Image (tube, helix red, strand yellow):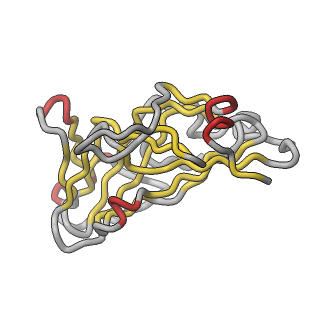
Amino acid sequence: MAVLCDTQIRELIGIEPLQENVKRPGKISYGISSYGYDVRVGTRFKVFTNATSGGAAVVDPKNFSDDLFITIDTTETGKDHIIIPPNSFALAETVEVIKVPRNVLAICLGKSTYARCGIIVNVTPLEPEWRGKITLEISNTTPLPAKIYANEGLAQMVFIKADRVCAVSYADKGGKYQDQAGLTLPMVD
């Protein structure tokens, strides 16, 4: 197994829109890096709150309710960011659509700029032949409100090429998150 470098990512991985990682003063970096791709968080967020449940709700991955979120789209608010409350989290979608080849596994890691502020992006894999926009989980581990900037870098995808092609890919098994067009809540088949 080998981690793909920048030239291999350009050649083998479907990323739309693909961006180069150039200096963008005042912006959190995104685009191709030496051994990964820094994805941007989009403009649509679902910020977790228990305000609508009166504090009586239970978070249940088998029966997850949209009522536990407030939906915010920065294109509608006119702001370049959202605020995640203390000790809470938000879901967001990437700007980029990713297409993982059958012989590659992608792993999503949080960027250090946010991690150094106590903002953590969940580590998650994209299986071989997974396609779509990535739904990212962003945790504010601090006791203070935290800003997340739309259309800027949030996480890095690292692509690992396998020595052999898998027998069953995510597409083969009809994965429930295949071809997601945007922010997707948890589902259980």
Residue 68 visible? The answer is yes
Displayed quadrant of residue 30: top left
> Residue placed at 61% from the left, 40% from the top?
6
Q: How many marks?
A: 0
Image x and y of residue 50, in percent: 22, 61
> Residue placed at 50% from the left, 30% from the top?
97
Q: Is residue 77 left or right of residue 174?
A: left
Image x and y of residue 1, in percent: 80, 54
As drawn, the residue found furthest toward the bottom would be: 143
Residue 53 visible? The answer is no
Image x and y of residue 175, in percent: 65, 40
From the viewer's side, name the closer residue of 139 and 184: 139
> Residue placed at 19% from the left, 35% from the top?
74
Whether 72 is drawn above or below 54: the answer is above
Image x and y of residue 170, in percent: 70, 40
Whether 116 is drawn above or below 100: the answer is below
Q: Is residue 70 left or right of residue 124?
A: left
